[in-house]
Image (cartoon, rainbow, N blue to C red):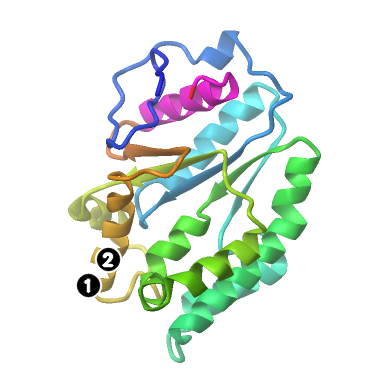
Amino acid sequence: MQEVSGSIPLSSTIISFPPLGTLPWATNPPDHGMVMFVVFEGGDGVGKSTQINQVSRVLTQRGIPHITTREPGGTPPAEAVRRALLYEKDQPWPLWAEVFLLAAARAHHLAHVIRPALARGDWVLCDRFTESTRAYQHQAYAENPALFDAIVHQATGGLTPDLTFVFHLNEGQRLSRRAGNPDDCFESRNHDFQHQVAAHFANLAHNPPAGYVFLQADQPIGTLTQGIVDTMTAKQKGVV
């Protein structure tokens, strides 16, 4: 695949960015006519939310209409599902119930937030999407991958992101960043579960789906932001 100087190649490697110069959008704003759905994926503590906020700031500076949102969540009913899934520790949900609840929340989120935003010309920056379901509900996928994929597809109606950034940190770095933060139901699960989640995201790099970009998340915040913005610019221009 062709690469652009200063941009992130869409490859199977985890990328570290060298220091880059001025953001290209500072002097060369992108064509507002192309609307993009961009997803930020990875384990807890890898910096997804920080980068969404940083990229959102750049888009605002350049006058690019956009929204930021998250999964599970994004609408009041979907946020209620989020609370039920993440913080009901006394009576945890059965495995497949998690999958169905996430699918219901996603369908509502898409119908009432993501699709309307894209239809009116707003970019969408989303913290997690279907890849997190595959990572965190990996046991259900292992039991019945065909059913799992059918549920995911039914919830999305086939909508896929234009770009998916997957952030990678080693376990020690990730746990250090999480220190002092309260764990939700998924984060409090045993080491084997956490290892499987991390392995899912890492293994994607060996056979990357189209539009996936893998980032080494221990780089300076500004360096990561600039690389993400450069890749979004290249995607708009049809270079990657």
Q: Position of residue 103 (x, y in %)?
A: 60, 70
Q: Which residue does the image show at 48% across and 74% down from the upper left?
A: 86
**214 and 172: which one is in front?**
214
Per the image, label 1 sits on a secondary structure element best described as helix
Residue 75 visible:
no
Query: Predominant secondary structure in magenta?
Result: helix
Q: Are marks 1 and 2 in contact (CB under 8 Å)?
A: yes
Q: Where does label 1 land, which residue?
A: 192
- Hey, which quadrant is residue 58 in on the image? top right
Which amino acid type is shown beneath numbered disc 1?
Answer: Asp
Q: Position of residue 231 (x, y in %)?
A: 47, 26
Mark 2 neighbour class, 10 Å CA radius: few under 14, some 14 to 19, many 20 or more = some
**6 and 59: which one is in front?**
6
Q: Where does label 2 land, which residue?
A: 196
In the rendered view, tell whether residue 115 sits above or below residue 145. Answer: above
Q: Which residue does the image show at 50% across and 19% down from the upper left?
A: 239
Q: Is residue 50 magenta?
A: no
On screen, residue 66 versus residue 9, left or right, reads right
Toward the front, the furthest residue is 146
Magenta range is 221-239
What distance separates the C-alpha of mark 1 from that of mark 2?
6 Å
